[in-house]
Image (cartoon, grey):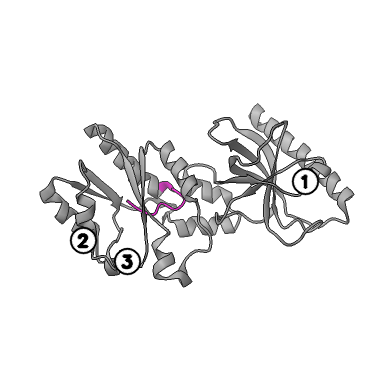
Amino acid sequence: MGVFDGVHLGHQAVIRRAVEGAHGSGGMAAVLTLEPHPIQVLAPERAPRRILASLEHKERLLASLGVTALLVLRFDETMARQPAEEFADRLFSVGGLRQVVAGEDWKFGRERRGTMELLRILGEPRGIEVTAMPAVMLKGERISSTRLRQALREGNLKAASEMLGRSYTVMGTVVRGEGLGRKLGAPTANISVGGEQLPPDGVYAVTATIGEETKEHRGVANLGVRPTVDGERRLLEVHLLDFDGDLYGNMVEVCFGMRLRKEQKFEGCEELKEQIQRDLEQVRELFEERKAGT
């Protein structure tokens, strides 16, 4: 159980323990999560402006860890007023429930009075094991979604990757744009990522997976407001190298690599077009170097 925003290493420790328990008892591992984040209901003024993973993105990440089912509870004022004991009774009434796993500091119920110790006391007579997992530390500090979000805002993708145990990705749907990229010699997919946290604006080397495919496509992404031609809306545009196909309506997961440069304003479209070609050449060289292991 948990919110699991970002599914970082701390979250993964909870999930892996549940998956191990399910395998050991011949059961099924399920994740129970709350949507939206409780802080958005209880204290919206303190809620983060950006999420680390949409519900659809979270579902994909959880499935990769061996989770069979994702149970989403709608968190609202009614649930916020529910006594902890009542929440626990509803939870333990689920047929066949054998084990509950959550972080040791997980709280639930009205005024956050419910604790993992309370769950253990209430679950024991029903034969339900309650496992409280300790926080996962990195360089002497607790890994948290807040810490992860801060690293991404600062553009520290290395620190973000260390906390995630993988490269940071965002997922969104390809929507129709103005076709400007094609005119500039590099057709792009405009990806609507909703409220997911993005790194600082700039041009990045990226890889992307399309839909349910596992194949990674190499590419270059521009993240920003396109000051040369637009200057208003923040967009994530991705050009996939050597790709020919229709991406409209597809779900795409984008993995950010090296930032090549900051976003900048050029004198006109010709100067921008020339820079785009240099960006493409640099990205190709980077991927070739990686392939050669240099």
Q: Where does residue 57 sit, x and y in percent of width and height?
A: 49, 45
Check disc 3 and report its element: helix, strand or loop. Answer: helix
**163 on left or right of 255:** left
Q: Identify the residue under disc 2.
A: 86
The tag earlier along the polypeptide, 3 or 2, is: 3
Residue at position x 57%, y 49% in the image: 157
Tell me the quarter of the image containing the C terminus.
top right
The stretch in magenta equals 1-9
The tag earlier along the polypeptide, 1 or 3, is: 3
**243 on left or right of 273:** left
Image height check: is 248 above or below 92? Answer: above
Q: Identify the residue under disc 1.
A: 179
Q: Identify the residue under disc 3.
A: 78
Q: Where does residue 177 sit, x and y in percent of width and height?
A: 72, 49
Q: Where does residue 67 sit, x and y in percent of width and height?
A: 36, 39
Tell me if label 3 and label 2 are in contact, CB under 8 Å: no
Q: Residues within 10 Å of mark 1 (few under 14, many from 20)?
A: few
Rounded to the nearest whole Å, what is the CA distance between mark 1 and mark 2?
A: 55 Å
**282 on left or right of 81:** right
Residue at position x 34%, y 40% in the image: 16
